[in-house]
Image (spheres, rainbow, N blue to C red):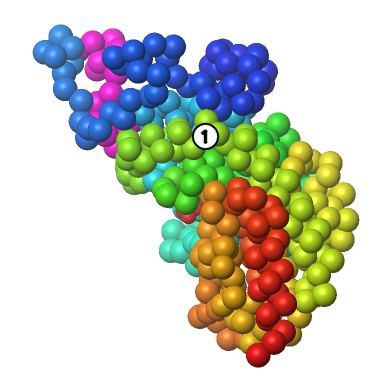
Amino acid sequence: MKASRKGTDPMVDAGFSTRCVHAGEDRFRYADSITTPIVQTSTFAFKDSKDIEAYTKHGKARFEYGRYGNPTEQVAARRLASMCGAEDCVVFGSGMSAIITTILALIRTGDNIVITDDAYKKTLEFCSSYLQRFGVGCTVVPFGDYDALEAAIDKNTKFIFSESPTNPYLNICDLHRLVAIARKHKVMTLLDSTFSTPMNQRALDFGVDLDLHSCTKYLAGHNDILAGAVLGRKTLIDEIRAMHKAIGGVIDPHCCYLLLRGMKTFPLRMARHNSTGMAVARFLEGHPCVKRVYYPGLESHPHYNIAREQMSGFGGVVTFDIKGGVTEANRFLDHLQLCYIAPSLGGVETLITHPATVSYYDMTRKQRYALGITDTLLRLAVGIEEVDDLIADLDQALRKSRRS
Ligand SMILES: *Cc1c(COP(=O)(O)O)cnc(C)c1O
């Protein structure tokens, strides 16, 4: 693995932060620009018929049409590959585009897939309902039940899809165990690593076959773009790239520039998300108005030991149950002055969601509770503001949640 990486990534010996700033770029660029130019074009011109021939017959490296690749996008893909320790990468216009295109590229009629039950809501929905239309079976297994996971594999199983940490309870998948089960049965493993990021956990180093990210979150990091990526061995990525060229969920060059820009400061931001996440989790755990906190860096988290072994930081998402009912939860939200009430995570602004009334509003209370989504559950995604300011905002709103 190391040798092949070296072949494709000249920055392989550089430190992580250096690669986040420089990997994927040519040393000198158009007009001697320090930044990667935004090549805002949908198509690329051939000089003459000889130029066409050089491309079609002699494999000249160049671009042809925007859906098949763009120079700005190519730099982002190479940089992500370097950050994740991957041979190759495809960048998409959203995380969901990366996930669905990858699945469609791998499956054939008659295949089965296995997915763990607390995967991202839209991923789970696609696998457990839409795949049937293509004659592909899907077994949903309880997250963390490795016996059930192994039992669900049959001779038609193509891959296991899992996620770590998961949303909203931040459950941690034991990657060594996942990969060992998959290898024993010769099936592939796909992991949505959005919540862990390549800084806190490099899934490919554990032997996962395909590493998927919603770059919308920490990697771009500013709550201003949507982007996604899949990373892995070149042979697998080539199949996904071919499907991507047909489906066309491309990222536009300007968006890609913002992703590149975000990735330059990613290690600094991520270190802050990790430390603030930890501090806020500890603060909430000691708060009289909080019933329970879920954060993999806390000893109280059921997967604390696995998290500590396989992750170098625990991220900026802290989930907690406040005391009381939906009235207290709403009152708490209404008193927040700094944290914004919004879905998403991983950006510089702190966001908070109330899953019961937002992501799961279309379910009955009974259905929600069966999934563990209580009326008082809140998912906080800390930004990079001053930790004391965040704690002060949470504290005043929590105290007011108890008073009518
Ligand atoms: C946000 C998210 C996605 C979807 O990504 P988009 O960029 O919104 O399409 C997938 N998985 C996880 C874990 C996410 O948090």
Q: Amino acid at mark 1?
A: Met
Foreground of the two, 20 or 396: 396
For image coordinates 44% across by 59% down, the residue present is 134
Quadrant in which the C terminus appears = bottom right
Taking 74 as reference, is 252 above or below it? below
Q: Position of residue 315 (x, y in %)?
A: 68, 48
Where on the picture, by quarter, is residue 30?
top left
For image coordinates 41% across by 48% down, the residue present is 225
The residue positioned farthest toward the bottom in the image shown? 404
Q: Position of residue 310 (x, y in %)?
A: 79, 41
Is residue 106 visible to us here?
no
Q: Is residue 65 left or right of residue 144?
A: left
Ligand 1: does it lie within 8 Å of the C-beta at label 1? no
For image coordinates 82% across by 65% down, the residue present is 285
Query: Overall secondary structure of the magenta stretch?
Result: loop
Foreground of the two, 54 or 34: 34
Q: Position of residue 154 (x, y in %)?
A: 68, 53
Residues in magenta, as a range: 53-70
Secondary structure type for disc 1: helix
Q: Check residue 331 for magenta coloring.
A: no
The residue labelled by disc 1 is 263
Taking 232 as reference, is 306 above or below it? below
